Amino acid sequence: MNRPKRTGISRRQFAQRAALLSASATIVPAAGVFPQLAPTAPAQEPSVPHPNLSPESQTEADARLQQILAQYGSRFSDEEKKSIQQINLMTQQALDRVRAFPLENGDAPALYLKPLVEREKKKPEMPASSRAKKS
């Protein structure tokens, strides 16, 4: 049978590209992989360094902000962009605290499923025949 040729992308190609992009997302910026996706956003003024962040954390926060603005920048007003920047800096502080926690591969989980309150145990009811004999 002759099937019409599809001009789209196959499932296999999609899966391969998705795996490649997810593996390289932290290494290569998206503009390097897909030049047609290169951001054309206007140049932003450099952000004021946050006093509680290290230079590496500040760089990571700025990169995250630029990524958000490149992807969704047209949807936000100037006031919303400033708010996003502040939220981003607070999030970076929380990330730094989580990353500073010492953890090894062999460590057990910190949380176990435990009941918070012990429930009272009910006394087993006597069968109806036993109750009749007592009366």
Image (tube, rainbow, N blue to C red):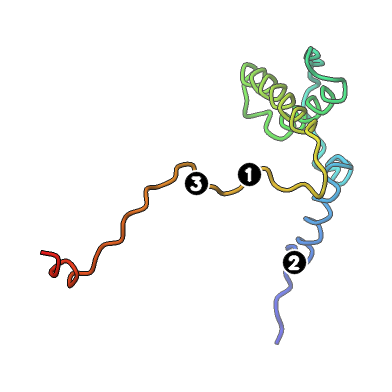
Q: Height in image: 62 above or below 27?
A: above
Report the quarter where the N terminus lies.
bottom right
Report the quarter where the C terminus lies.
bottom left
Residue 5 image offset from top left, x and y in percent: 74, 73
Report the mark closest to the observer, 1 or 3: 3
Report the mark closest to the observer, 2 or 3: 3
Q: Identify residue for label 1.
A: 111
Q: Mark 1 belongs to which amino acid? A: Leu
- The numbered dot on residue 10 is 2
Q: Height in image: 28 above or below 62?
A: below
Label 2 to label 3: alpha-carbon separation: 49 Å
Whichever of callouts 2 and 3 sits on the residue coming sooner in the sequence is 2
75 relative position to 92: left or right: left
Along the viewing direction, whichever of 72 and 120 lies nearer the viewer: 120
Residue at image position (31%, 56%) is: 123
- The numbered dot on residue 6 is none
- The numbered dot on residue 115 is 3
Label 1 to label 2: alpha-carbon separation: 43 Å
Q: Mark 3 belongs to which amino acid? A: Pro
The image quarter in which residue 134 lies:
bottom left
Whichever of callouts 1 and 2 sits on the residue coming sooner in the sequence is 2
The image quarter in which residue 19 lies:
bottom right
Provide the secondary structure element on which disc 3 rests.
loop
